Amino acid sequence: MYTSTFTFAKGIFDDAFFALDADIAQIARSIPGYLGEESWENPEKGLVVNVYYWESLEALQTLVNHPSHIAAKIRQGEWLAGYQVLIAEVVRAYGDGTIGHPLAKRCPYKKPAS
């Protein structure tokens, strides 16, 4: 499994930004191998973090090569005050099973042996 983490500094968002952002999210969710997503915002720093979870690099690459994603990359300077992308391989995921994480079904909680 893989993650693509997109961290960006907020700029000025217009209707075109919101339309393209919604389009890319819908496209991502329709790709076989998409596992889920999470988002956070740090208002003090003006940063937003979107994490997408993928079954494979090929699934992620499908989004990266999509025309809407390419259009967003070309126009990012109109809307963002900076960004960083991190692609990572998930080597382990675990928890106590109490929160609805996108990988919970792939990495279910197992009670430790006593």
Image: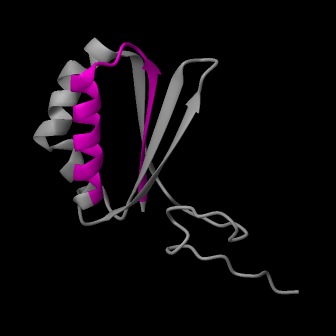
Compared across the picture, whether 62 is left or right of 107 comes to left
**Magenta span of residues:** 2-29
Query: Is 28 a magenta residue?
Result: yes
Q: Is residue 111 above or below residue 71?
A: below
Q: In this view, does 98 lie above or below 15?
A: below
**Residue 30's image quarter?**
bottom left
**Residue extending farthest bottom:** 114
Quadrant location of the C terminus in the rendered image: bottom right
Image point 22% across, 51% down: which residue?
Answer: 27
Expressed as whole percent of the image width and height from the top left, the position of residue 21 reads: 28, 35
Image point 69% across, 81% down: which residue?
Answer: 110
**Residue extending farthest left:** 67
Compared across the picture, whether 105 is left or right of 66 comes to right
Q: Is residue 66 above or below residue 19?
A: below
**Residue extending farthest right:** 114
- Whether residue 58 is visible to the viewer of this picture, yes or no, is yes
Image point 60% across, 76% down: which residue?
Answer: 108
Expressed as whole percent of the image width and height from the top left, the position of residue 9 reads: 46, 19
Image point 14% across, 44% down: which residue?
Answer: 66
Quadrant location of the N terminus in the rendered image: bottom left
Q: How many marks?
A: 0
Expressed as whole percent of the image width and height from the top left, the position of residue 50 reads: 45, 40
Query: Is 4 a magenta residue?
Result: yes
Instruction: Name the residue nearer the viewer: 22 or 6.
Output: 22
- Whether residue 61 is visible to the viewer of this picture, yes or no, is no
Compared across the picture, whether 105 is left or right of 26 comes to right
**Residue 76's image quarter?**
top left
Instruction: Name the residue nearer the viewer: 12 or 94.
Output: 12
Q: How is the image coloured?
A: one colour
